[in-house]
Image: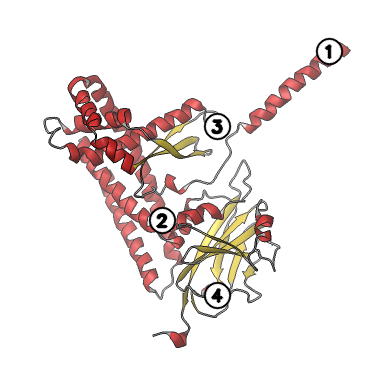
Amino acid sequence: MSHIYSILFFLLIIIFPSISHSSKENCQPSHQPQWVLTPLHDKQNYYGISSAAFVNHKPDYQEIEQAKDRAIKDLSYGLSVDIQSYYKEKLSSYNDDEIKSSLTLSARLVLNGIKIYDQWTDCKEKQHCVMVSINRSSSDKQVKAQEFINQVLKCLKSDQKKIRKSIDSMNDIISMRMKRIERQYDHLIKLSKVLDNKLTASLTQKEKSYRELIKHIVMLTQQFNQSQQQKNNQMSTMINAQQQLIKDVENISKNIQSDYFLSYINDDVAIPKSDLHVRIVPENGRKDFYEGENIRFWVKSNQDCFIKVLYISKTGEEFMIFPNAHDKINFLKAGVQKTVGERNDLKVIQPLGLDTVTVVASKAQFSNIHEQLMLTNGIYHTQHFRSPLHGVQARAIGVVEEPDFQAYATDTCYIISNYSKGDLK
């Protein structure tokens, strides 16, 4: 009998670690990065984005590699469209589909320096997303080198099987890009509706520019919907239409990525919906304040939660105005309104302009909140951001996410600070 118990004990030692290990292998939910819906646009890099589905609890090596390979194809295809005009004379005797196919193939074979920029796993939809990038300067030099055009001409002259296969692959890339563009336009419509609800009736110049952005999004979305209804089998026409749609989204993305309020609202919309909701507004809904005035904000949630309120000036300096050195208890009871600034400790100071105020609510206490309170410079913990995107990435740091659902929510408002009435010219 003791011999049997020994065997059972030995089996338990083997089995339980494997059970514990397998539970750790489950897909862990994480915050969706902005590039999934709002394409990054800068002067330093070219980007390619794609994804691959996975079937188990998390993506395996092959599925991650498939997503990476598709992203490299997406980058190469995007480059092929941009650089075709550079070799217009040398390629004039070939048809458009063959040229783009050969350029795409050659970009994948010749270009060095393509790297994974970021990746994200969508646990709910079971999709692993990858963004790859290549330095623009390095890429442009390689594209203009003789080795590149030699490879292109070699493909066109002798590798017709590869060309035909690549044309089929390009159709897949075009299809995946269109699905991504459709998601981006859906997201922009949601963004415009939320933004519209945030604006006041009496418009300042800054608010007028936001109204213009809303109109622009609505107009482009209508054009996109019309283009979707027109079925056209010519690849060149589809590519041209797609490139215009991508430029439209990129132009809007530039506006979003250069504006703190837009970036934070954009992130609010992108966070997957959960059963936790939080709301922040200036006291009495007032948006205009003058230098030296006290300001307060009302925060309310539908569930018990922990909150932090961040105030971002137009220059990118962030103050964690709640909790702070004087008011450290950041637990908020469901349905109970919290007034942030009730001690009259928040006052309008320069630099003046449109300032962004955001709340992050978490079902669990923030893992870094005590550390931040210890690092307070005076009353508030402060930090300075390089860009709006940097600010968005930093605001949810310290949120403890639970495995089965989104554990936090955000909401954003703004105030416009002005010189005192007597100083107005």
**Rendering coords of residue 6 (x, y %):** 83, 15
Q: Residues within 10 Å of mark 3 (few under 14, many from 20)?
A: many
Ranked by sequence position, the earlier of labels 3 and 4 is 3
On the picture, is 365 further left or further right than 414?
right
Element class at badge 2: helix
Residue 229 shows in this picture? no
Cα–Cα gap, marks 3 and 1: 37 Å
Ranked by sequence position, the earlier of labels 1 and 2 is 1
Q: Amino acid at mark 2?
A: Gln
**Rendering coords of residue 382 (x, y %):** 58, 62
Ranked by sequence position, the earlier of labels 3 and 1 is 1
Q: Residue at x 25, y 41 (%)?
A: 82
The residue that label 4 is drawn on is 284
Of badges 2 and 4, the one in the foreground is 2
Of badges 2 and 3, the one in the foreground is 2
The residue that label 3 is drawn on is 58
The residue that label 1 is drawn on is 4
Cα–Cα gap, marks 3 and 4: 47 Å
| Vertical order, 4 against 223 (above or below) | above
Q: Amino acid at mark 3?
A: Lys
Q: Amino acid at mark 1?
A: Ile
| Vertical order, 399 against 78 (above or below) | below
Q: Residues within 10 Å of mark 1 (few under 14, many from 20)?
A: few
CB under 8 Å between discs 3 and 4: no
Ranked by sequence position, the earlier of labels 4 and 1 is 1
Q: Residue at x 50, y 46 (%)?
A: 32
The residue that label 2 is drawn on is 257
On the picture, is 311 further left or further right than 4?
left
